[in-house]
């Protein structure tokens, strides 16, 4: 842009009080543009190579796990819901509360089954599992086993879903052999949903790793589904292999063949994940170096995170779906806040209750993206009758993953996950969390006011926003809250900088690395040799990260703002050189 064009544009901006985005004519800055281009290439490449991962999990491997290897086929499911025992001394109020909780657990279990295409819930049975009648080998007592077996003999059931986090390998083998049906638990059902929804290479590798973890234990303990044990017993040769599995070199028995097959699969998955982790770490580092605000969006599954991000970014690339675990991998999306400040929203995998500890690994990649963010938007479906428990599940899961992955987390400037003083753990900055209560359109005003007045959230009124992402209500309020929080935490600073109205590199640097909200041409006259000379300067109102401002000061030390910044660094009024980083 020439000086004349810049002068004309700046005059228009000052006269009409025009506030424009951080880049000329509302375009993305080169850093953000390049970053998103790299990410899109990586994502497209990942999708193109995802078929290679499908080849790893062949039907022979899937049938060893004991779940329907083609979940797209029609299956009738029997849901066995395990009830928590009620104490004999429990009051009427306590009993009512526990019955209400059990109804919610049962409702979520049904929703999980319905998340698998072509699976239909035939019926559900509920049983208390008392310690006195507990059978560690079969999970149920003799009478309950007889009742379930009788029900199966009278009804056509393909899959038996036991609503418990995870059954043991012995229980799985015994129940499978007795009922001659697919027997799955909460772990295996969530894994099946993940396998269906995973589209990129990395997501499929994560699912394969979780399958390998389960397969290893079942193969080593010889706890296989009924159809495999019958094939082995009917085999005339001890070295026969299950149909669909390839003969592993050096195998002598069927068990040895399966063990070597799983080992080979584990090695391939491990190599693939190591490469994927390196690529993800490299991309995350580029994000941090761009000093663009990273906003991580978390919440319970199906709370409306993706719909909210679509409303914030107005992108057509997102296709929200009303089902559990529609999002199975983290993704990033460009957006703009108030005054044209650029930001990146990280969409993450939703959390769920009663998640087995071993399944937490599936959320590790998602949490690594969360940890790098400056702010966290915690989305809650306020219309859900169990919204309080969902809030608690998300908070507990985040704390659990923080402790598990503390040493591997990569935190950036003003990240909400901060290293502790001893350096051995991390601390979560609760002030960096904005609570969003979504789907408010599903409640009446009275119901909404009643839930918002709950003790659980009354202390967070300054950090809460009520939205309806589908109707775009509260979206601008959320943008304002994010923008204000970035300023209050110090990640962004509002500065006024005066630069000369000619090309010396200052304007170009700020235009690329900061958000120019307003610029005004100023004229003043200087007296040199008794001649008055008109000199132009540009007064810029910018929003900028301090690291960017520090680099500006080092590149252009003669500028007035540079002197102020350098003095702040010397007196350590902002933060020390060690905290600023390279």
Image: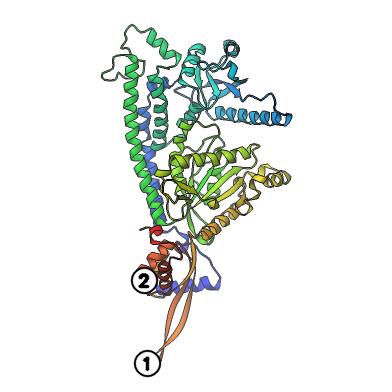
Quadrant including the N terminus: bottom left
Between disc 1 and disc 2, whose residue precedes? 1
Q: CA distance from mark 1 to mark 2?
A: 28 Å
On screen, residue 273 versus residue 484, left or right, reads left
Few, some or many residues within 10 Å of mark 2 (<14, 14–19, 20+): some
Q: Quadrant of residue 301?
A: top right
At x 39%, y 22%, the residue is 59
Residue 578 point in image, percent of width and height: 38, 58
Q: Which residue is mark 1?
A: 529
Please state if 101 lies on the left or on the right of 525 as rendered. right
360 relative position to 273: left or right:
right
Image coordinates for residue 240, horizontal then vertical, percent: 32, 12
Quadrant of the image occupied by residue 568: bottom left
Is residue 49 in view from this perspective?
A: yes
Label 1 vs label 2, nearer the camera? 2
Q: Quadrant of residue 442?
A: top right
On residue 556, the disc is: 2
Quarter of the rendering occupied by the C terminus: bottom left
Residue 513 makes an appearance in the image: no
The location of residue 224, given as percent across then percent down, is 42, 17
Give the SS element for disc 1. Answer: loop
Judging depth in this view, the residue of 375 and 534 nearest the camera is 375
CB atoms at circles 1 and 2 under 8 Å apart?
Answer: no
Q: Give 52 or 123, whichever is nearer the viewer.
A: 123
Above or below — where is 239 with respect to 13? above
Q: Residue at x 43, y 41 (%)?
A: 405
């Amino acid at each position: 842009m020439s000086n004349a064009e810049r002068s004309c544009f700046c005059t228009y901006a000052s006269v009409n009080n025009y506030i424009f985005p951080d880049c000329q004519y509302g375009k993305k800055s080169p850093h953000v543009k390049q970053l998103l281009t790299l990410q899109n290439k990586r994502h497209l490449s990942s999708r193109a190579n995802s078929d290679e991962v499908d080849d790893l999990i062949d039907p022979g491997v899937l049938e060893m796990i004991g779940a329907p290897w083609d979940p797209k086929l029609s299956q009738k499911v029997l849901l066995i819901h395990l009830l928590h025992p009620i104490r004999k001394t429990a009051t009427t109020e306590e009993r009512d509360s526990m019955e209400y909780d059990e109804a919610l657990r049962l409702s979520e279990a049904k929703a999980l089954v319905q998340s698998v295409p072509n699976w239909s819930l035939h019926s559900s049975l509920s049983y208390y599992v008392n310690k006195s009648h507990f059978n560690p080998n079969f999970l149920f007592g003799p009478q309950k086993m007889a009742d379930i077996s009788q029900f199966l003999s009278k009804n056509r059931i393909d899959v038996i879903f036991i609503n418990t986090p995870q059954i043991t390998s012995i229980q799985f083998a015994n129940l499978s052999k007795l009922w001659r049906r697919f027997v799955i638990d909460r772990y295996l059902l969530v894994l099946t949903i993940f396998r269906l929804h995973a589209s990129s290479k990395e997501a499929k590798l994560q699912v394969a790793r979780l399958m390998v973890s389960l397969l290893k234990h079942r193969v080593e303990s010889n706890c296989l589904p009924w159809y495999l044990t019958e094939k082995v017993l009917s085999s005339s040769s001890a070295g026969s292999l299950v149909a669909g599995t390839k003969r592993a070199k050096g195998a002598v028995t069927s068990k040895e063949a399966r063990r070597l097959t799983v080992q080979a699969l584990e090695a391939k998955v491990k190599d693939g994940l190591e490469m994927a982790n390196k690529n993800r770490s490299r991309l995350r580092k580029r994000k941090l170096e761009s000093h663009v605000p990273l906003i991580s969006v978390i919440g319970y599954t199906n709370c409306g995170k993706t719909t909210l991000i679509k409303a914030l970014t107005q992108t057509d690339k997102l296709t929200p779906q009303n089902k559990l675990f529609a999002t199975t991998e983290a993704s990033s999306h460009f957006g703009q806040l108030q005054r044209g400040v650029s930001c990146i929203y990280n969409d993450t995998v939703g959390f769920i209750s009663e998640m087995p500890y071993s399944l937490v690994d599936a959320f590790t990649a998602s949490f690594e993206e969360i940890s790098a963010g400056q702010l966290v938007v915690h989305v809650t479906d306020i219309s859900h009758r169990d919204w309080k428990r969902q809030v608690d599940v998300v908070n507990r899961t985040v704390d659990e993953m923080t402790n598990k992955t503390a040493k591997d987390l990569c935190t950036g400037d003003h990240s909400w996950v901060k290293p502790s003083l001893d350096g051995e753990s991390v601390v979560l900055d609760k002030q960096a969390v904005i609570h969003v209560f979504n789907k408010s359109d599903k409640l009446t005003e009275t119901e909404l006011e009643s839930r918002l007045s709950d003790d659980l959230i009354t202390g967070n009124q300054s950090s809460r926003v009520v939205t309806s992402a589908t109707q775009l209500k509260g979206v601008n309020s959320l943008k304002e809250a994010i923008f204000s929080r970035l300023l209050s935490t110090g990640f962004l600073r509002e500065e006024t900088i005066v630069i000369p109205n000619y090309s010396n590199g200052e304007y170009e640097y700020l235009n690329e690395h900061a958000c120019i909200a307003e610029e005004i041409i100023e004229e003043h006259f200087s007296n040199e040799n008794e001649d008055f000379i008109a000199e132009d300067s540009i007064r810029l109102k910018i929003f900028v990260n301090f690291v960017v401002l520090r680099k500006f000061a080092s590149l252009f030390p003669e500028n007035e703002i540079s002197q102020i910044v350098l003095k702040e660094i010397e007196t350590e009024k902002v933060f020390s050189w060690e905290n600023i980083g390279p």
